[in-house]
Amino acid sequence: MNPEWEVVIGLEIHTQLATKTKIFCGCPAGAPEGKSVADLGPNANTCPVCTGQPGALPVLNRQVVEYAMKAGLALDCEIRRENVFSRKNYFYPDLPKGYQISQFDLPICEKGHVDIEYKFGGKEHTKRIGVTRIHMEEDAGKNLHMDEFSLVNLNRACVPLIEIVSEPDMRSAEEAGAYMRTVHAIVTAIGVTDGNMQEGNFRCDANVSVMPKGSTKFGTRAEIKNVNSFRFVEKAIEFEVDRQIALIQSGGRVVQETRLWDSAKGQTFSMRSKEEAHDYRYFPEPDLIPVHVDEKWLEKVKASMPELPTQKKARYVTEFGLSGYDAGVLTSSSSLAIFFEETLSLLGGAAKGLAKSVSNHVAGEISRLLNEEMIDITAAKLSPRHLAEIVKLQAGNSISSTNAKTVIGLVWKNGGVVEKIIETEGLAQVSDTGALEKAVEGVIAANPGQVAEYRAGKDKLLGFFVGQSMKASGGKANPTLLQEIVKKKLSS
Amino acid sequence: MLNEKYTTITAIHDAFDRKELSPVELTRDTLAAAKASKHNAYLTLLEDRAMEAAKRADQILAETGKVPRDRFPLLGIPLAIKDNLVIDGVRTTCASKMLENYIPPYTGTAVDRLEKAGAVFIGKTNMDEFAMGGSNENSAFGPVEHPTHPGYVPGGSSGGSATAVRANLCVAALGSDTGGSIRQPASYCGVVGLKPTYGRVSRYGLVAFASSLDQIGPFAKNVEDAATVLSVMGGHDPLDSTSSSRPLENFVAELKKPLDWKGLRVGIPKEYFIDGVDATVAKTVRAAIAWVEKQGAKLVDISLPNTPYAVSVYYIVAVSEASSNLARFDGVRFGVRPPDAMKVGDIADFYKKVRANFGPEVKRRIILGTFALSSGYYDAYFRKACQVRRLLKNDFDRAFKDCDVILGPIAPSTAFKHGEKAADPLKMYLNDILTIPCNLAGLPGMSLPCGKNEQGLPIGLQVIAPQFRDDLVLRVGHAIEKGYV
């Protein structure tokens, strides 16, 4: 981070809502159960409304309004009781009507905030980020560019989105990444979106500017469009900050423009400048009446809200004595929290005592593997049943913590039965006193010099004997038992 | 020709009952008349579809003996449909080159309800391009000839429907009214034309001109037929969010109730009899009003002070919405593509070539609307217009405290000659001053023939009532029609 410059970041997050049907017609919003949208034939999910046939009219899907309200409540927003759809007019081949139905000056949610926590420079930080507004809108179709022509697929046209707009409150790429992760955790936890980032169901535009430290006047901003990964957002912002600082320092000027992130090159590049920017000519959508949210409806939606990640996190800390950081990792995605809780429920009465051990594995090795492969836990071969078994065996000293990790790694790769893996891989922990004594005796006999030093008062050497004995046992010795035997043998 | 002999729904159904006429016979003659006509009222004739519907009607009659009026209130009735209303598989042009080859994949709600009620669709009628105009001279497929006075315009934009009804090329027809496009041609052609309350008839399937003003309505030979058509096609439609869920009256039954003239307060707005209104038109309309007074109704002088702003407000609101509604005709999905589409330089060039398919009036309105909505002008034009629109509505709300219905002229003049106003768009726009207020306020309004000028050109009386009092418009119109016309 450049100490002379301050970075200002605001994010606009687009989230596809997981409703059954589209926002303004009865077409399915996604693929049938068990299929991917990629499997759908071109324009399979379309009708006169979402293809923008002349004379067809939009009818608002109430589920979309409820999901937007849920997102608003989860992000501590005020719900606007009378909110209005507007037309955003622009020409693009994937936009059937020549305008997008969105919300403009009277969005459904306003004035919310999100508390983020993140590690930076080895320390944990917390910060409150303002949420300016959340509005509902329809998605556009998708263009497929061939060599000499382009094709348009309108399966995605009219699929419901919410756009969550933050205040320009973030001051670093880390904060922006943490904000995006937190919002992702919240909207997936309340079930309004599947949050699938590969399919673009959760993506963001980042507004980035720099100003000299201490200045109160924001610099000219560039907008980085359509970034669909947490890491890319951080990288894109880092690149953009460096680019802008270098530009200003070399006597240049940042121009207001839209940029795109090229993940292969690790760079942002200009898409269009402000001079080419659209005048969207927003005006109230005359085909829809204002959305009226009455007290009864709002109360019903409030009552249907599930436990939020922040509430869940606090519960994990008090109920299971987890650290704030670990609890944060477990609640960062609802599927991870579900995995954690299912593992605990399989442990039955022992759950409370073993929660920390389960948490260590989930927040540690399992999270590492998930990040490495960029998959969701629901797609992993490792099940809560596997983990419960491993944690139980570890607690009963049947395997060491190191080997527990190894077993997790093996199940991760190939699946299988935990006990069998331990047996075939020889990962069981040796608690047979006779066998361990024999190993320790061997080490003592092989190192007479160190034995003499130890007995002369060099206590530090205990670790050496334990280590050597562990090695002799092939790493399988029960460490507590082994230490006891080493101590006993050395003092006799 | 049977279409000359049997001209109203009741007369036709009675003839069906007596077996002196069959749906197939009537349809065949109507189609023949439409084909032979030189009015250019139809853009597309639906011969096969019409004959099939007529045969179905014949079958139903063969089974039931008499017309089952409850289930099929329009059984075997030849209707014409304005060419901005979509029917599945039937070319819908909006009288524009842009949609010359557009075949919609669905049927609009109002049209669908008519067809299910047994109606026979003769064809799609000519109009001003995208319903923009008041003389039917803006059709890309040539103007419509006045049904009784060659050389004169039939009015617009629903000029083809009005002409088809008056010339007996159908029994009744559908039009759309955004600023007078049903009432003004009805007045010029001497037929009944009703613009229902905004939200009374579903707009699903009506190619939008100005969404907050457009409303589908009937043309007919008399008020009763108009009431029948409205009763069939009106009412809530889940596919149109702006359609009202208020229950729909049986308007035909309403007409049977005697009108209590003595309890009726009739408002006469002074702003509707200003200098620009032709003296004969004013005299003829006042004569009808005098008759109403003679029946015992109480005349009340009322004022609608914001009427002079109506044209300005309308030509901002309507064109703004139109600029957005017509954006989809861009040559990508809709609209005629340039033959060298694959070779055009860039997307701007492509767009320019496609948009050249609009006629001059449509282009003018798209440009005006785009300007009125553009950043920096929105507040001064669109927002201001919406505020004044509210004031216009308030004028009516205030007036309707003192009266039950309003009577006045439809248009400042009778039908004019082809080309007379075509060179002066502003003059053409001002011609709409007496019909536009109903659209801006969402009120029901009807044109009822009430006399003729020296050349025999028809003059229309306008009947206006509060929102959702379409029943009152029809009942008052019906009573005047029976006693006076």
Image (cartoon, rainbow, N blue to C red):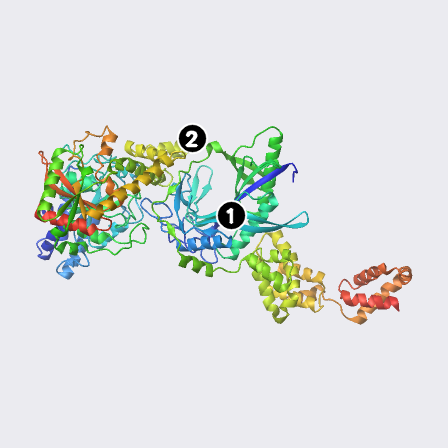
Q: Image check: B59 left or right of B381?
A: left
The crowding category of the residue bearing disc 1, from other C-alpha atoms within 10 Å (few below 14, some 14 to 19, many at least 20), is many
Could you tell me which chain the residue with mark 2 belongs to?
B
Helix, strand or loop at label 1? It is: strand
* CA gap, disc 2 and disc 1: 43 Å
* Residue type (three-letter) at the residue carrying disc 2: Gly
Up the image or down, A272 lies above or below A131; here it is above
Q: Residue at x 13, y 33 (%)?
A: B279
* Res A363 seen here: yes
> From the image, which quarter does the N terminus of chain B lie in?
top left
Q: Which residue is mark 2?
A: B345
Q: Position of residue B378 (x, y in %)?
A: 38, 36
Q: Position of residue A189 (x, y in %)?
A: 52, 57
Q: Image check: B50 left or right of B372?
A: left
Q: Could you say which is closer to the camera, residue A138 or residue A128?
A: A128
Q: Position of residue B64 (x, y in %)?
A: 15, 61
Up the image or down, A451 lies above or below B481; here it is below
Could you tell me which chain the residue with mark 1 belongs to?
A
Q: Could you say which is closer to the camera, residue B281 or residue A185?
A: B281
Q: Image check: B230 left or right of A298?
A: left
> From the image, which quarter does the C terminus of chain B lie in?
top left
Q: Position of residue B73 (x, y in %)?
A: 18, 55
Mark 2 or 1: in front is: 1
* Residue type (three-letter) at the residue carrying disc 1: Val
Q: Could you say which is closer to the camera, residue B190 or residue A260?
A: B190
Q: Residue at x 46, y 61 (%)?
A: A303
Helix, strand or loop at label 2? It is: loop
Q: How many marks?
A: 2
Q: Which residue is mark 1?
A: A131
